[in-house]
Image (cartoon, rainbow, N blue to C red):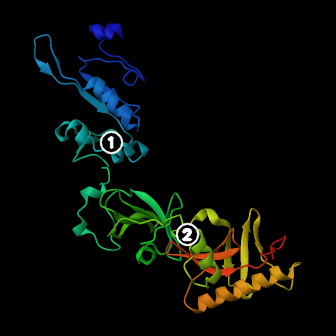
Amino acid sequence: MDLFRKGIAKIIVSARSLIEGFNVPEIDVGIIAASSTSVRQRIQSIGRVLRKHKTATGEEKNSVIYTLYAHNTVDEEIYKKINWDKITGVDNNIYYLGIPYENPIKQEGPPHRPLKRDYEIDENELFEGCVYQGEYEGEEFTCDTNGNIKNSNELYVINANDLPEKIKNIKGGYGRFKVTPQKKYILVSVLEENEWKTKFVTKLKEPFKFINKKSEVSSNDLEEILKSIKTGDEYPIQDNKQIIMELRYSSKKGGVIVKKIDKGEIFAKTTQTAEDREKGEDAENLIKVIKNLHAQGKVISKIFLNNRNDVLFREKGILYFIYRLKKGLEFSVTKN
């Protein structure tokens, strides 16, 4: 390396010298054949080679670096990660396609360019269901059949309005979506013709509001409300910490309450099979109440049991009362 620096050795071959801190301010040409897809390493290599220097006669001279990537391979992914024109200047980057036994063919630009960020996309060009030509970025949320939207911290949104239905119409079902960081675009990822595409749903009209975990009523008022609460009423406590069990209602076999376990599912026993008849009656009454709610147009599948023996369901982020168990539920030992 010392001989190279002194100009005695004209060529140096090294796998990692440009990465590990080998500075050569007077280098003429750098060739990187074993290219990394790491943006950080690429910038380090460029920084060690592309430096202005003067010749022995005082003439200012620029270095040149040739970086070789295998065409149509993961090597080219580096061009999706960052806009290199912004790093080195658009006039400083020249691209060629090398074909064996032929002269290199000059290209108009890199094989890929990074997708646009949300602030780079004109919202006037967007419409519901269109393919979004930007990055699938932002905070991720999920929505379900009951119109519930929650974030990764299990906090529920209370001002979702008709967003879940819009997501279903474009995505083909409920599930994950993202809200972009600046423009607040709602985006979904859809598999079409074996290719994942990002689609625009809508723009968030107002920031999401999350449910207040704590009850806003006094303890005395709370007890009075709970004494007179009826099926379908908004539950006065919205804190998820009260929930001790998550269950599911299935319309199979005339209606059953299902509990998921590691090896499958078990079912709440009715009076025909329960050892404790009162628990069997609780299961039958709960099923009856849920059926009545379905008849009123409610779509209930996931239900929750809290520490007060109250069974609840969630709709558009809000917990509602279904039924108060007198004794509890008794589950089958094996799957029915």
Q: Name the residue under label 2.
A: 218
Residue 317 seen anywhere in this rendered image of the structure: yes
Picture coordinates of residue 267 (x, y %)? 77, 76
Above or below 21: residue 214: below
Res 198 quadrant in image: bottom left
Q: Relative to 261, does residue 286 appear above or below in the rendering?
A: below
Residue 165, position as x, y percentages in the image: 44, 78
Quadrant of the drawing holding the N terminus: top left
Question: In the shown orientation, is residue 195 left or right of residue 255?
Answer: left
Q: Measure the C-alpha gap from mark 2 to mark 1.
A: 77 Å
Tag 1: Cα neighbours inside 10 Å, few (<14), some, or many (≥20)?
few
- Give the residue type at disc 1: Ile
- Residue that lies at the very extreme toward the left in this rendered image: 58
Of the pair 175 and 148, the residue shown nearer to us? 148
Residue tagged by mark 1? 99
The residue positioned 40% from the left and 66% from the top of the image is: 208
Residue occupying image coordinates x 10% and y 17%:
59
* 2 or 1: tag closer to the N-terminus: 1
Which label sits in the foreground, 2 or 1? 2
- Give above or below for 278 relative to 152: below
Residue sitting nearer the eye, 201 or 86: 201
Label of residue 253 in the image:
none
Q: Is mark 2 on a helix, strand or loop?
A: loop
The quadrant the C terminus occupies is bottom right
Left or right of 182 on screen, residue 311: right
Q: Nearer the viewer, residue 78 or 282?
A: 282
